[in-house]
Amino acid sequence: MIKIEKLMMENIRSFHGRHELNLKRINLLVGENSTGKSTILGVLTALNEQNNIPITIINFNTAPFLFGSFNDFITKRGGRSKKEKFLKLGMGFFYRYRTKQHYNYKKGILKAEYENSEGQPKLHRFQLGLKNFYFDILYEKDIKAIIYRHNKNELIDKYDFDLFFNGVCRELDNSSKVIDLNLDYDDISNKFPPETILKLIVFELFKKSHDLPNQETNYRDFVNELRFIINYSNYNIVNIAPIRSKPLTTYELHGDIYTPEGNHIPFVIEREFRDNLTSGLIKSIEEFGLESGLFSKISIKEFGEPKGSRFALNVKVNGPARNIAYVGYGVSQALPIVTESLLVKSGSMILMQQPEVHLHPRAQAALGTVLVRIAKDQDKRFMIETHSDYIIDRIRQEIAKGTIKSDEVNLIYTEMEDNCTKLYEIKLDENGSLINPPASYRKFFMEEEYNLLTREFNGDSN
């Protein structure tokens, strides 16, 4: 699995010019509406929708984020006639690569540049850098060229795209037993996506390892690492939507296929009760329920046979258990957040939008604690877009308690300046105190607190 540790964006929506963002174990994304927070979440979602090398093909219309066509999300400066030509994305990443002796943790960098092609982003340039080599693949109307470098400085070779690959393809037909490249030979003659190009480079480097005996280990290690990057580039990024599914009195159709709104969660819980009555998942959910004051127990009531064909989800708040549709709306909104965070595999990143919706202050604070526990105990990462001071303050308290280190938490504040997003990464000390936050950050939360108190005074709270 690849883990993103730095995100780079340029000329997408309100992100004019180059922006870099460090991704840590817990990332808190705060700021006023329409200041770029959803763009960050949407870009991370788009990066995860890949089957081959990431960012070679990008889709900015994956639920719950819909960015429209290229002309809709390319940055505009000074009116619609002054659109930027290229949109750029990149990431610094690290990956765990296994050798015969042990696992190694290594770093790399990916960059891509896109242009408009019938309203969709088309790859114009692709760059991949690992420890020993750096590739720069340029796509233009008539000329396609490739450069690969050693440590980004020494030029190893530069080729005319078509001449080089025509020659390599002929050699591959005669030398396919040297290394299994899994190439689609019919596709190579008229199409050169980056993953195919890099596989061809691997072939060339493998040949050079025989010409340069003293470099053989270096080249062969790199060949294996590059093939790992090509074949295992999924980031396991999971979205949880801001408005979760509406609770039902009964659930009748099997529906445990993942949705950002959490429609699948009742079916997951029902199956957990049916298959494992001593479930650790149920125990963890109920621990959150107690800490938050939302509920103390959850249970399933089955109707008919076979089991799971029709059931009700019940929760105990005070007194006997009641149907989830007849208790406070906060329960049904919190369950998908906690359950999905517990379900996803270790190493995943969970994207959350406004997890505090319909939760009272105690529940918001308890959610902050449970997310810290999951992040630390299960090696997961969170990008949480929130307006909740209670969640942020509870995470700061967990830093002070030593549950999580201050350098594992990133407080990201967004604001608009001249119609462009400005990013602040606010550091925290070992006591959870903010280090030199911008003045506008404190003003933002003072206004949020005032708005919350006004709603409660007017009887508008849930």
Image (cartoon, rainbow, N blue to C red):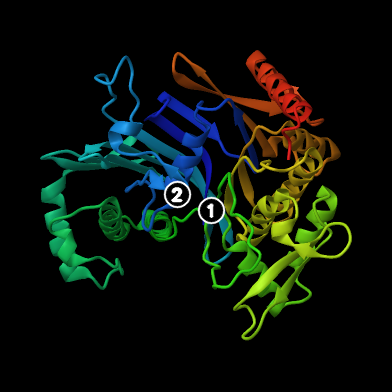
Residue 58: percent from the left, percent from the top? 35, 46
On the rendered image, what quadrant is the C terminus found in?
top right
- 211 horizontally vs 332: left or right: left
Any part of residue 377 in sight: yes
**Front residue (pair 296, 15):** 296
Residue marked by disc 2: 63
In-front residue for pair 83/310 = 310
* Cα gap from disc 1 to disc 2, whole angstroms: 8 Å
Query: On the picture, is 176 further left or further right than 274?
Result: left
The answer to whether 219 is drawn above or below residue 320 in the figure is above
Percent of width and height locating residue 90: 41, 38
The secondary element bearing badge 2 is classed as loop
Residue under label 1: 260
Q: Between disc 1 and disc 2, whose residue precedes?
A: 2
> Residue 131: in sight, yes or no?
no
Rendered view: 422 above or below 48:
above
Report the residue that reaches farthest toward the right: 319
Q: Position of residue 332 (x, y in %)?
A: 68, 54
Give the secondary structure at mark 1. loop
* Amino acid tagged 1: Pro
In the displayed structure, does residue 358 sit left or right of residue 93?
A: right
Q: Amino acid at mark 2?
A: Ala
- Report the front residue among 382 and 324: 324
Q: Quadrant of residue 407?
A: top right
**In which quarter of the view is residue 126 placed?**
top left
The reply to whether callout 1 and callout 2 are in contact (CB within 8 Å) is: yes
Task: Give the image quarter of residue 346.
Answer: bottom right
Residue 95, percent from left and from top:
52, 52
Work out which residue is located at the far bottom of the displayed protein and give it. Answer: 305
Q: Is residue 240 above or below residue 277?
A: above
